Amino acid sequence: MKMKLYRLSLPLAHEFRISRGAISTQPSLIVELEHDGVCGFGEVTENSFYGHTFESITASLQKATDMLDEYIDRSPAELWQRMLSALDGDLFALSALDIAAHDLHGKRIGMATWEDWGLEWKDVPTSSYTIGIDAIETMVEKLKEMAGWAIYKIKLGTLQDLEIVRELRQHTDAVFRVDANCAWTAEQTIANSHVLADLGVEFIEQPLPIMATRRDKQRVFEESALPIIADEDCQQARDVESCQGLYHGVNVKICKCGGLTPARRMLHLAREMNMKTMVGCMVESSIGISAAAQLLPLLDYADLDGAVLLGDEPARGVTISKGVIQRSDLFGCGAELIRERVEKFLVS
């Protein structure tokens, strides 16, 4: 089995800002696995917050080169723990490899990945569209530009958070979700939750920092007027159980947990614990988004607009129209590189 890596720079349609910083391009690494002329694709993005670069991810993936043939006769789930050890615990690198292996497996057997898992594609949730932090008038313009979505996710963590939501509410009756990206205190969260509930907000995502005390997280869980969804506090499978009693639901990110294999396990576990389930994304191409879409039958909420936020990309897969996710006509995870367009996005 052969592995090829593509280092890409993906342009965003607009600068995207959260409480930790802003980007106008997204560095992304595409992993291609090929066997007998069939190709599977995976993706992971660079992430300075979690300390992952092209160089570190590439170095980790190269450690698995001699083991790739094991994917020919064994499933990605069977090999996940073994690959984790081979990659020295690099979950970002493993996430791209695990996605590519699932994609290749599905394409070889002629089935979509969700179908191979025995899931049913019915009553799947629609995706939200994310509005990054900006001047209030610019955020309003972004909302108007993407009018017609049923759900908007609003990035907060500013001195004008409530003013932002109040102003956006003047321009749509859509459902709002807010994500403070660890920027609030317990007191702010509880106070804001009551105002936001009156403004048609559905839930608050990760308001407190990871290092906030358990007492503060439990207080927010008990006193918030809105459900609280864990993101940064739920990165790996072991974190799901820790979130019980502190969060009403979990947002699983494939890159953080190490691929589709653990993401699926985390979602099943969260459901067993009566927590709401959500899958989010980074700003990424249709390869990463299509992989995350395989988990839709297990979700209460979806935030899969990463490719919609791009100005251009060299891939095709699932499509999202005003939040409604349409399956791809491809097997596996349902995405592929458009080879004649790749060179435009390559970086050395």
Image (tube, rainbow, N blue to C red):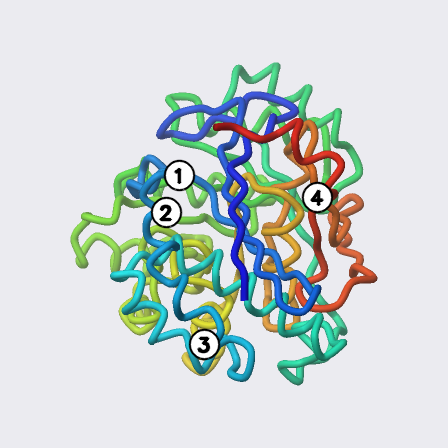
Give the crowd class for mark 3: few <14, some 14-19, many >=20 residues within 10 Å: few
Of helix, strand and loop, which one carries label 4?
A: strand
Residue at label 2? Answer: 57
Q: CA distance from mark 1 to mark 3?
A: 27 Å
Residue at label 3? Answer: 265
Q: Are marks 1 and 3 in contact (CB under 8 Å)?
A: no
Q: In this rendered view, identify the residue nearer to me: 203 or 15.
A: 15
- In percent of the image, x 75 and y 68: which residue is there? 331
Instruction: Give left or right: position of 175 versus 111.
Output: left
Instruction: Give left or right: position of 155 versus 63.
Output: right
Q: What amino acid type should be assigned to the residue bearing mark 4? A: Ala
Of helix, strand and loop, which one carries label 1?
A: helix
Q: What amino acid type should be assigned to the residue bearing mark 1? A: Phe
Q: What amino acid type should be assigned to the residue bearing mark 3? A: Arg
Q: CA distance from mark 2 to mark 3?
A: 23 Å
Q: CA distance from mark 4 to mark 1?
A: 19 Å
| Residue 54, numbered circle | 1
Where's residue 187, x and y in %?
27, 41
Q: Are marks 2 and 3 in contact (CB under 8 Å)?
A: no
Q: Are marks 4 and 2 in contact (CB under 8 Å)?
A: no
Give the crowd class for mark 2: few <14, some 14-19, many >=20 residues within 10 Å: many
Query: Which of the two discs, 2 and 3, sits closer to the camera?
Result: 2
